[in-house]
Image: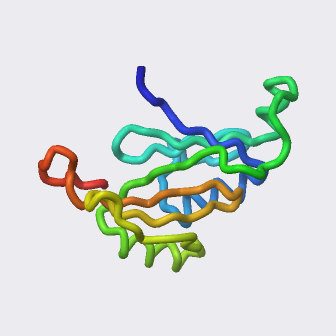
Amino acid sequence: MHLTQIRLIVSDFTGTAAYYREVIGLRPQFDTVAPPYVAFEPEHGSALSLHDRADLDAVLGGVLRPGSGADSALIVLRVDDLDRYLTEVTGRGAEICTGPVVFGGRIRSAYLRDPEGNLLEIQQWLVTRSGEPVPPAS
């Protein structure tokens, strides 16, 4: 088994898609980004997808719980230079919630929220678990 994607169920499809494309800098799978679905595929084979809440709720027969009170997902993205990336994304409108913080001397992370309130962790690997050189994130 492997993880094929993380899919966020969003109420503001257009605004959230623009955030991931224009602010965070992810590349969409296809040039056309339109509701009800889009996939962003970072360079290392994983995917982050957005699905319009109303469309998915209709497809599933109204089983989605309304509201967005609690965090329902955490998206983790890795970059080569956390400070440079944070400078870039805050310049494009992102707001840092907390961080940077270092975990176990191995990973340095900062946290942002997208327009839907989903939590993002942006991390820079300082060392690998195996002690091998850190592979580039991009």
**Residue furthest toward the top?**
1
Taking the image as shown, residue 114 lies to the left or right of residue 41, namely right
- The image shows residue 28 at horizontal and vertical percentages of 52, 48
Q: How many marks?
A: 0
**Residue furthest toward the left?**
132
Name the foreground residue: 26 vs 64.
Answer: 64
Q: Quadrant of residue 93?
A: bottom right
Name the foreground residue: 119 vs 79.
Answer: 119
Taking the image as shown, residue 114 lies to the left or right of residue 55, namely left
Image position of 39 with respect to 107: above or below: above
Name the foreground residue: 123 vs 48.
Answer: 123
Image position of 82 with respect to 50: above or below: below
**Colouring scheme applied when the structure was drawn:** rainbow
Question: Which residue is painted at 63% across and 59% down in the image?
Answer: 18
Taking the image as shown, residue 73 lies to the left or right of residue 60, namely left
- Position of the N terminus, as image quadrant, is top left
Q: Quadrant of residue 53?
A: top right
Image position of 115 with respect to 27: above or below: below
- The image shows residue 29 at horizontal and vertical percentages of 50, 42
- The image shows residue 109 at horizontal and vertical percentages of 41, 63
- Position of the C terminus, as image quadrant, is bottom left
Question: Which residue is painted at 42% across and 39% down in the image?
Answer: 46
Question: Which residue is painted at 53% across and 43% down in the image?
Answer: 48
**Residue furthest toward the front?**
104
Question: Which residue is painted at 59% across and 56% down in the image?
Answer: 119
